[in-house]
Image (cartoon, rainbow, N blue to C red):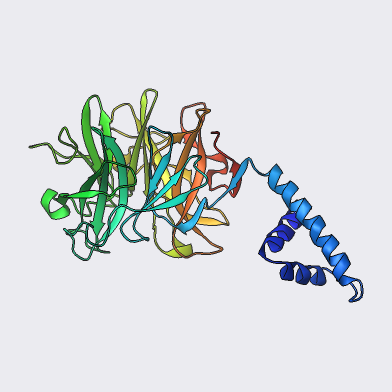
């Protein structure tokens, strides 16, 4: 019954004409003489039901939370409690969205313009941004690449005084050919024990190195260290308790409904590993435990954002996926991260929710 009402409400919101058509197809069509009055009564009743249903569902949200292609999301919470989200430039120049509650988002603009966008890879796209707040500045790391340009791609950095920008490009940190790591994209910044580090890599190994004190360049003479094998990209590391949890993505990201992307995890007591899965297999040997797989509605789910918390201390994570009902691009999905008795992260059902309770704010 609930699904029937939901369908009627959707049609009602579209237009009264569709309601009339729906009723006709449902054998509820009224004889022409009495149709106007009875139809008005029926429409009024449906509106009342829809308002009641909406009130009952006010504490839930539906995936996708933004039905626009926003791959590889990154998020930051500002001092005033607002959240800002950035993504790969399917909207040119890196789109920026703002929210107060993680479910209702407003587009605020882009990090760059055509005149200010980075250019160290002249025909490259801006991929997989990573937003941070460092030394009083909003620092946006980004990847720049052409598809298949695994030796010319690289990682750059830009800064701004405000989360909505404008961002001033500070240029590249390195390209693959400079640091001798093929496919140097998908960077992630983390501070640990007073030092700043950058992790990166895409299906050619995951690596890490130390950054300068301002985070805008590599520390001179800093060595790079390999952290994980060739199954992974889109690294994100989250410290919880005594463990560092390394989230990453496996499979194909960008083949529409044929995409096989999944979000996976391993953990370690050290930032630099070894990271192991639930069975103890090392991520250097491509071990992993799946956190988010596919279901009948969303496939190719992965490349997560940072974990953020609501007012109740619940953990939430954004990631992209392909909606099989409208498989154009990779839409923004949201789910609560829970932790099992052994301290491993999971989401309910192991795949994207269609509808769930909202974060608490």
> How many marks can you see?
0
Relative depth, front residue between 346 and 76 = 76
Relative depth, front residue between 95 and 173 = 95
Task: Please tell me whether residue 132 is drawn above or below residue 169 in the rendered image.
Answer: above
* Residue 284 percent coordinates (x, y): 29, 41
Q: Does residue 122 appear left or right of residue 47 in this picture?
A: left
Task: Please tell me whether residue 36 is drawn above or below residue 2 in the rendered image.
Answer: below
Question: Which residue lies at the image location 23% right of the left edge and 39% below the top edge?
Answer: 198
Residue projecting furthest to the bottom: 32
Q: Quadrant of the C terminus?
A: top right
The quarter of the picture where residue 251 lies is bottom left
Residue projecting furthest to the left: 221
Relative depth, front residue between 5 and 265 = 5
* Residue 48 percent coordinates (x, y): 78, 52
Q: Does residue 46 appear left or right of residue 347 in this picture?
A: right
Q: Does residue 361 appear left or right of residue 44 in this picture?
A: left
Q: Does residue 257 appear left or right of residue 133 in this picture?
A: right
* Residue 113 percent coordinates (x, y): 27, 59
Task: Please tell me whether residue 352 is drawn above or below residue 299 in the rendered image.
Answer: above
* Residue 281 percent coordinates (x, y): 36, 37
Question: Which residue lies at the image location 42% right of the left edge and 37% below the top edge?
Answer: 307
Question: Which residue lies at the image location 74% right of the left edge and 60% below the top edge?
Answer: 8
Q: Is residue 28 visible?
A: no
Question: Which residue lies at the image location 16% right of the left edge and 40% below the top edge?
Answer: 224
Q: Is residue 295 visible?
A: yes
């Amino acid at each position: 019954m609930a699904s029937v009402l939901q369908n009627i409400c959707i049609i009602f919101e579209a237009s009264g004409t569709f309601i009339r058509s729906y009723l006709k197809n449902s054998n509820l069509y009224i004889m022409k003489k009495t149709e106007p009055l009875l139809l008005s009564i029926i429409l009024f009743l449906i509106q009342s039901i829809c308002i009641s249903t909406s009130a009952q569902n006010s504490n839930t949200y539906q995936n996708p939370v933004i039905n626009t292609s926003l791959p590889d999301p990154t998020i930051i919470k500002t001092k005033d409690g607002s959240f800002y989200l950035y993504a790969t430039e399917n909207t040119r120049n890196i789109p920026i969205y703002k929210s107060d509650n993680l479910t209702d988002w407003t587009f605020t603009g882009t990090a760059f313009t055509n005149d200010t966008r980075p250019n160290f890879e002249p025909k490259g796209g801006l991929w997989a941004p990573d937003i941070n707040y460092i030394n009083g500045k909003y620092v946006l790391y980004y990847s720049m690449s052409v598809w298949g340009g695994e030796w010319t791609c690289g990682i750059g950095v830009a800064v701004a005084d405000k989360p909505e920008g404008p961002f001033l490009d500070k240029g590249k940190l390195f390209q693959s050919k400079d640091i001798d790591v093929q496919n140097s994209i998908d960077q992630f910044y983390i501070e640990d024990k007073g030092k700043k580090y950058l992790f990166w890599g895409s299906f050619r190994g995951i690596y890490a190195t130390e950054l300068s004190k301002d985070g805008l360049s590599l520390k001179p003479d800093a060595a790079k260290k390999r952290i994980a094998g060739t199954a992974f990209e889109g690294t994100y590391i989250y410290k919880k308790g005594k463990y560092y949890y390394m989230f990453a993505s496996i499979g194909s990201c960008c083949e529409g409904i044929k995409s096989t992307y999944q979000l996976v995890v391993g953990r370690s007591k050290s930032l630099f590993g070894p990271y192991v899965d639930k069975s103890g297999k090392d991520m250097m040997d491509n071990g992993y435990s799946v956190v988010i797989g596919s279901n009948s509605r969303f496939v190719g789910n992965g490349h997560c954002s940072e974990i953020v918390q609501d007012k109740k201390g619940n953990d939430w994570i954004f990631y992209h996926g392909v909606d099989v009902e409208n498989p154009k691009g990779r839409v923004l999905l949201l789910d609560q991260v829970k932790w099992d008795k052994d301290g491993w992260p999971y989401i309910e059902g192991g795949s994207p929710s269609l509808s769930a309770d909202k974060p608490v704010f």
